[in-house]
């Protein structure tokens, strides 16, 4: 499902018009589709009518509201249209309003006196909010804030059309009072506010209404549109287990991870690779950490390599990594390897020399910051998995700017350096410079050390099994978050550990086979 900005949505509508639609027809389609969703969700019929209050703005979102009013009236509902901002101004909306008046539907006008309108809010079973849609920025004025507070305090269920009034569609922010929707009906596609945390909570349940705009209409817009996926989409992407197969069928992941101080990073990364289906996994770690790391493993191949006095890989360990990489189908580099002269030299040289698809995480990313342009010399596809702090070191931008614009930051970096970026935020973004995926799974229980190591191990497993870098990253990010959501429901976000998520993976995969 596409995730588009207000401008991208308008461009898609224009593309649909070029195919033969008219804007009034799209408005009629939008209103009818929204009304059908409301009817189904609230089990409305002639025998089960509802009292419906529809708050309409003066623009095109209000026009959608007028169509909804007409359809709800046809369904047998007791409908009242409240003009929240005065008379409609958009020509399409004026036409739709005239049909409302011709049908004899009750229309009231808001004159900043809520007292006279109080009975409508008290009697409403459903409040449909169609005031601004995607066109709103800033804060609601006082009179609309009063309306929002009255709606939020009522017993009615609130349905917002496209975007709850008071929420900024594109920046996915709320600066003041907002209509707190029980359901938001997204027109044709998701908007950033529908999925970006934390403000997506104001949208309630999201339902997408099809109004005749096609995927091709979105693909023809002049900028890259984001998309998100659901469980069924991911299920189709995952490598299938073949009835006749062996360990060689499912790839060989080489995980170059761990050190004396960070043995858990190696355990979580390697175990994540195993649990996600790689046929073989090799755990390469410093010799000095053998006693701490080796006893944790029974399934992977073990490859202890030369270590230095700090308990991390010595630079000379690079030779062993290169030799092992010849037998692998994908490589993970960086989880818990430490940051010093040896590891920096090893990382930068491996980036130039490795010929297998490679994921670089954690201290591997930190090692790159000393010579970021080395990425342009890579011989194999590279996936980087930074959190905002690591992304800041990579691109030189402050963390608040990265958190405020993760999609733009990830896209520009991926495009400049020819890599796939997995920018880990509340909504993790995966971008290869051509495609942008925004993740919707996961929760704050993942905000602890080790979660990223597990994610990288999952991604290298899918990469080793033959998935493209972008698809491997997308599947890992989605499933990592989905698994964490399931664990949080069973236990808690506060108490869950990355190892809990790891241990739940087999049960989660039972729903994908």
Image (cartoon, grey):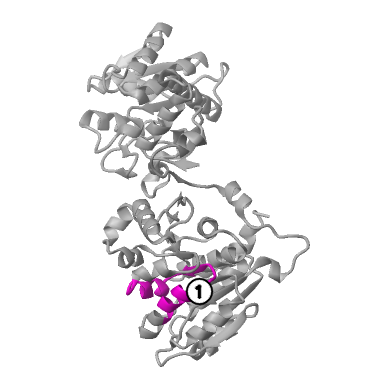
Q: Quadrant of residue 414?
A: bottom left
- What is the residue that sits farthest to the right in this orientation? 244
Q: Which residue is mark 1?
A: 354
From this viewpoint, is residue 478 visible? yes
Please give the range of residues in magenta. Answer: 346-371
10 Å crowding of disc 1: few (<14), some (14-19), many (20+): many
Q: Is residue 46 above or below residue 354?
A: above
| Residue at 60% over, 47% down | 232
| Residue at 41% over, 26% down | 128
Q: Quadrant of the C terminus?
A: bottom right
Q: Is residue 353 above or below residue 41?
A: below
Query: Where is residue 451 shown, x and y percent of the image?
Result: 47, 67
Left or right, 402 with reference to 427: left
Tell me the SS state at disc 1: loop
The total number of labels drawn is: 1
Most foreground residue, 488 or 458: 458
Query: Where is residue 371 shown, x and y percent of the image?
Result: 33, 73
Q: Quadrant of residue 426?
A: bottom left
- What is the residue that sits farthest to the bottom in this orientation? 309
Q: Within the magenta stretch, is there residue 96?
A: no
Q: Is residue 435 above or below residue 453?
A: above
Query: Where is residue 415 shown, x and y percent of the image?
Result: 39, 56
From this viewpoint, is residue 158 visible? no
Query: Where is residue 86 shown, x and y percent of the image?
Result: 26, 19
Q: Within the magenta stretch, is there residue 352?
A: yes
Left or right, 53 with reference to 178: right
């Amino acid at each position: 499902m596409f995730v588009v900005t207000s401008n991208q949505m308008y461009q898609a509508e224009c593309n649909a018009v070029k195919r033969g639609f008219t804007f009034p027809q799209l408005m009629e389609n939008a209103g009818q589709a929204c009304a059908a969703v409301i009817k189904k969700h609230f089990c409305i019929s002639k025998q089960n009518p509802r009292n419906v209050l529809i708050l309409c703005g003066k623009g095109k979102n209000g026009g959608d509201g007028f169509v909804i009013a007409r359809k709800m009236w046809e369904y047998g509902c007791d409908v009242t249209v409240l003009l929240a901002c005065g008379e409609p101004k958009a020509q399409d909306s004026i036409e739709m309003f005239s049909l409302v008046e011709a049908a004899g539907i009750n229309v009231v006008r808001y004159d900043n006196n809520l007292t006279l309108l109080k009975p409508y809010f008290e009697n409403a079973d459903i409040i449909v909010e169609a005031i601004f849609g995607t066109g709103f920025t800033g804060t609601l004025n006082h009179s609309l804030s009063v309306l929002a507070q009255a709606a939020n305090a009522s017993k009615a269920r609130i349905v917002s059309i496209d975007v709850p009034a008071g929420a900024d569609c594109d920046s996915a922010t709320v600066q003041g009072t907002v209509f707190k929707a029980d359901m938001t009906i997204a027109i044709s596609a998701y908007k950033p506010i529908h999925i970006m945390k934390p403000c997506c909570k104001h949208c309630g349940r999201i339902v997408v209404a099809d109004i005749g705009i096609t995927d091709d209409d979105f693909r023809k817009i002049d900028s890259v549109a984001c998309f998100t996926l659901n469980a069924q989409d991911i299920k189709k992407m995952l490598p299938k287990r073949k009835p006749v197969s062996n360990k060689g069928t499912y790839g060989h992941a080489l995980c170059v991870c761990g050190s004396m101080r960070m043995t858990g990073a190696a355990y979580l990364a390697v175990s994540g690779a195993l649990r996600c289906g790689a046929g073989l996994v090799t755990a390469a770690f410093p010799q000095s950490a053998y006693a701490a790391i080796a006893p944790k493993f029974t399934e992977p191949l073990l490859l202890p390599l030369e270590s230095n006095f700090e308990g991390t890989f010595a630079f000379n360990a690079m030779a062993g990594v290169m030799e092992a990489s010849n037998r692998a189908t994908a490589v993970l580099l960086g989880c818990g390897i430490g940051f010093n002269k040896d590891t920096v030299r090893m990382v930068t040289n491996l980036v130039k020399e490795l010929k297998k698809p490679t994921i670089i995480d954690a201290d591997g990313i930190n090692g790159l910051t000393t010579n970021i342009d080395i990425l342009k010399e890579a011989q194999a596809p590279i996936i980087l998995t930074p959190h905002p702090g690591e992304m800041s070191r990579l691109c030189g931008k402050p963390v608040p700017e990265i958190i405020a614009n993760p999609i733009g930051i990830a896209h520009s970096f991926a495009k400049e350096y020819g890599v796939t970026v997995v920018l880990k935020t509340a909504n993790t973004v995966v971008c290869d410079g051509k495609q942008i995926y925004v993740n919707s799974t996961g929760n704050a229980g993942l905000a602890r050390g080790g979660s990223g190591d597990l994610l990288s191990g999952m991604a290298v497993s899918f990469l080793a099994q033959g998935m493209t870098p972008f698809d491997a990253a997308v599947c890992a990010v989605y499933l990592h978050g989905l698994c964490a959501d399931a664990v949080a429901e069973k236990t808690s976000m506060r108490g869950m550990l990355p190892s809990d998520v790891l241990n739940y993976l087999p049960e989660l995969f039972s729903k994908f086979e």
